Image (cartoon, rainbow, N blue to C red):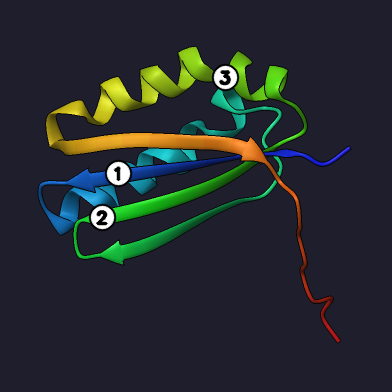
């Protein structure tokens, strides 16, 4: 069984807001998202961030939605827009380090 991917898009007001949100995320990630597998944040612009999070199941992904909302509430004043998509991961590849 493949894992579940959640792709979150966040648009902030200023570049510093992205920095602050990522710094905050690093402090709460372990407590708020205990079933999180890999996560990858991609700065898609000066004020935009795409976060690709992997969970072992839909249940695990859904279970963290209240904590996800708490995180968004913390940064709400600096957010212009946010939304997410979820779905089955149908292919994953990571080159092993040589």
SS type, badge 3: loop
Classed neighbour count for the residue bearing mark 3: other residues with Cα under 10 Å, few (<14), some (14–19), many (≥20) = some
Q: Do the residues labelled 2 and 1 touch (CB within 8 Å)?
A: yes
Query: Who comes first in sequence, dot 3 or dot 2?
Result: 2
What residue sits right under mark 1 in the picture? 10
**Residue found 20% across the figure and 65% down from its top:** 46
Determine which quarter of the picture holds residue 80: top left
Q: In the rendered view of the protein, which quadrant contains the N terminus?
A: top right
**Image mark for residue 89:** none
Please give left or right for residue 91 compared with residue 79 in the image: right
Query: Who comes first in sequence, dot 3 or dot 1?
Result: 1
SS type, badge 1: strand
Residue 77 locus on image (x, y percent): 13, 29
Residue 49 locus on image (x, y percent): 33, 53
Residue 48 locus on image (x, y percent): 26, 55
Determine which quarter of the picture holds residue 30: top right
**Image mark for residue 48:** 2
Residue 10 locus on image (x, y percent): 29, 44
Q: Distance between the residues labelled 3 and 2?
A: 23 Å
Q: Are marks 3 and 1 in contact (CB under 8 Å)?
A: no
Please give left or right for residue 8 compared with residue 5 in the image: left
SS type, badge 2: strand
What residue sits right under mark 3 in the picture? 64
Classed neighbour count for the residue bearing mark 1: other residues with Cα under 10 Å, few (<14), some (14–19), many (≥20) = many
Q: In the rendered view of the protein, which quadrant contains the C terminus?
A: bottom right
**Residue found 27% across the figure and 20% down from its top:** 73
Residue 65 in the image: above or below residue 47: above
Please give left or right for residue 98 compared with residue 21 in the image: right
Query: Who comes first in sequence, dot 2 or dot 1?
Result: 1
**Residue found 71% across the figure and 46% down from its top:** 89
**Residue found 79% across the figure and 76% down from its top:** 95
């Amino acid at each position: 069984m493949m894992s579940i991917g959640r792709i979150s898009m966040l648009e902030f007001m200023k570049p510093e807001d992205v920095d602050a949100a990522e710094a905050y995320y690093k402090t709460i990630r372990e407590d708020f998202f205990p079933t999180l597998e890999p996560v990858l944040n991609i700065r898609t612009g000066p004020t935009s961030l795409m976060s690709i999070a992997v969970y072992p199941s839909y249940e695990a992904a859904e279970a963290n939605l209240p904590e996800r909302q708490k995180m968004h509430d913390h940064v709400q004043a600096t957010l212009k827009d946010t939304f997410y998509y979820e779905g089955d991961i149908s292919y994953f590849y990571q080159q092993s380090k040589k």
